[in-house]
Image (cartoon, helix red, strand yellow):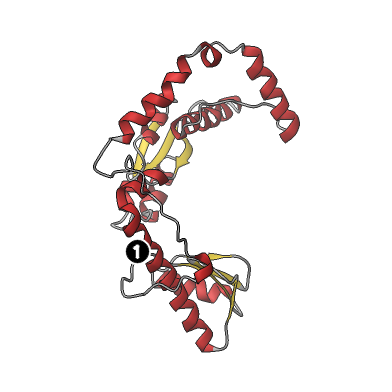
């Protein structure tokens, strides 16, 4: 996805985005320093500004009311992340961080050329059919699982395919099996946000659970009132909650 993002935007647009983001963070940091009562930490930075306050909770509450997302480190430290929203901010990248080498200049990296999402999976999947990959002895996976258990102190290890959808399905099956082991066979309802990625409801259906939708607002925030009502209405049969958001919904 990162590669496709770079291919789509191209070198110059990526530079503009990076300069805009860093410039916004630098301007924000400079403004805080001028106040004289705050301590900006973690220098140098690219887009994340770490600030020390007397009480981080007051700052976080004020930021939330103004629809600003922040991260609390502890009772005094708050992290602000700059977004690429202010085009007026100019670049302030230190010379030591600026790259002078060419990038994304290979002819094949053409945003209107080859459809990579069609070509790449084919070339990646072809080797899977080779005997060296396809005909591995099951003992290899058994031994690997045992070694991972020794390393992690887990009781068991599942070697799932490295896809998010496979992980969703595996987790849902674990949750369903847990409820069944407790005799709660009736707990088969999963609450899903309407903004969720398409694989979420598909995984729930495959795990033989029932789906209950919960809405979001225009900014894809969870409708907590609707979530509370859905949870209360289905509390006797509720098994789990899947909370995710498709990238397309954010864009």
Residue 70 position, x and y percent, is: 49, 66
- Indicate the position of residue 96 as horizontal and vertical percent values: 53, 68
Does any portion of residue 235 appear in the rendered image?
Answer: no
* On screen, residue 236 above or below 16: above
Q: Residues within 10 Å of mark 1 (few under 14, many from 20)?
A: some
Picture quarter containing residue 79?
A: bottom right
* Residue nearer the viewer, 227 or 20: 20
Residue under the image location 63 percent in, 67 percent down: 74
- Helix, strand, or loop for circle 1? helix
For the point 61% across and 80% down, which residue is it? Answer: 54
**Residue closest to the eye, 236 or 110:** 110
Q: Nearer the viewer, residue 180 or 173?
A: 173
Is 6 or 38 nearer to us in this picture? 6
Tell me where residue 141 sits by quadrant: top right
- Pointer 1 residue: 16
Judged left or right of residue 200, residue 179 is right
Residue found at x 49% / y 77%? 29
**Location of the N terminus (image quadrant):** top left
Disc count in the image? 1
Which of the 4 image quadrants contains residue 24? bottom left
Q: Is residue 213 above or below residue 54?
A: above
Above or below for 156 versus 134:
below
Percent position of residue 244, x then y: 42, 45
Residue 57, percent across and down? Answer: 55, 72
Q: Is residue 240 visible?
A: yes
């Amino acid at each position: 996805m990162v590669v496709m993002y770079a291919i789509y935007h191209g070198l110059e647009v990526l530079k503009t985005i990076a300069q805009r983001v860093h410039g916004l963070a630098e301007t924000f940091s400079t403004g805080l320093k001028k106040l004289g009562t705050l301590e900006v930490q973690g220098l140098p930075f690219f887009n994340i500004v770490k600030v020390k306050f007397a009480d981080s909770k007051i700052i976080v509450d004020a930021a939330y009311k103004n629809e600003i997302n922040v991260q609390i480190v502890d009772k005094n430290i708050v992290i602000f992340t700059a977004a690429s929203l202010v085009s007026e901010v100019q670049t302030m990248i230190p010379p030591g961080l600026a790259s002078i080498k060419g990038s994304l200049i290979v002819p094949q990296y053409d945003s209107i050329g080859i459809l990579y999402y069609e070509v790449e999976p084919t070339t990646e999947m072809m080797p899977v059919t080779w005997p060296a990959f396809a005909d591995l002895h099951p003992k290899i996976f058994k031994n690997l699982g045992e070694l991972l258990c020794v390393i992690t102190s887990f009781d068991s290890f599942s070697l799932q395919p490295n896809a998010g959808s496979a992980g969703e399905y595996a987790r849902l099956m674990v949750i369903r099996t847990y409820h069944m082991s407790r005799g709660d066979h009736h707990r088969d309802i999963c609450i899903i946000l309407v903004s969720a990625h398409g694989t979420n409801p598909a995984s729930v259906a495959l795990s033989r659970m029932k789906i209950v939708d919960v809405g979001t607002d225009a900014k894809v925030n969870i409708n907590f009132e609707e979530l509370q009502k859905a949870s209360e209405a289905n509390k006797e049969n509720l098994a789990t909650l899947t909370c995710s958001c498709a990238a397309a919904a954010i864009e």
